[in-house]
Amino acid sequence: MYTYRPRRSYLSTLIDRVASQYQPLRRFSTRFVVTAIVIIILGISVIIFVPKVVYNQVTAPFVNNDNGVYAAYELNVVKQTDQSKLGQAGEYLLKKQLYPHAALAFKRAADLDPNYRDAAYGWAYAILQDKQTKLTAGDLQDIHDAIKRAEAVDPLYIPLLKLKLLMAEIERDQDTAQLVQSRLRLLGEK
């Protein structure tokens, strides 16, 4: 009786021929093959992960240390001479909630142009947002300096008056609070 034997593909016959020529490879034990595979996997993982670990160790002081970034930014801001660009940078940094950087940009812009009301206001606002509950005497002095600069340019600027009212409440200064509230009422604000 005749049985059908499917014809072997060219690839399988080629593999058989190559395997028959390399009989010594068949002598390796299963333990050796598993060990070789494990060593190859470990080698690949070392090649992939060791550079990442080294990179993270080298860059960690720069990434995790905000003081280094702040110091570099401070050097960059000191070199700037265009107050409008500094003001725009300060606004952008306020939106990103990078308040110390924004305060630095606004302070530099206010130093360059004493009539730049928004820079002085932004400087005070950024300091207040950054140190909401931990205001030091130096921070309070900077806020008052910024408020004075902005008031010299526009004493009826409503956001500035609201900031001044907030500062009076923080410092528990009833006289200043009443004066600012009366100005706000005159301007139609609460």
Image: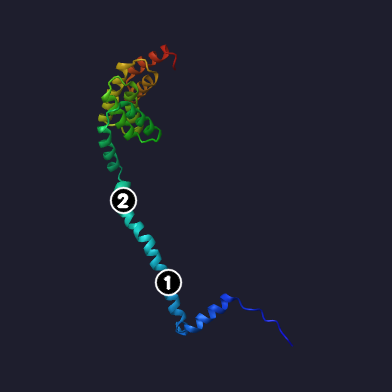
Q: Name the spot of residue 165 as percent of width and height, x first.
A: 36, 21
Q: Name the spot of residue 82 as percent of width and height, x first.
A: 30, 27
For residue 189, above or below residue 46: above
Residue at the spot x=30%, y=19% of the render? 115
Residue at the spot x=42%, y=68% of the render? 41
Q: Is residue 133 visible?
A: no
Q: Is residue 186 visible?
A: yes
For residue 129, above or below residue 32: above
Amino acid at dot 1: Val
Q: Quadrant of the N terminus?
A: bottom right
Residue tagged 1:
38
Other residues around mark 2 within 10 Å, as few (<14) / some (14–19) / many (≥20):
few
Residue tagged 2:
59
Other residues around mark 1 within 10 Å, as few (<14) / some (14–19) / many (≥20):
few
For residue 61, above or below residue 96: below
Dot label at residue 14:
none
Based on the displayed image, in which of its 4 quarters is residue 89 positioned? top left
174 and 105: which one is in front? 105
167 and 107: which one is in front? 107
Furthest toward the bottom, the residue is 1
Q: Are marks 1 and 2 in contact (CB under 8 Å)?
A: no
170 and 112: which one is in front? 112
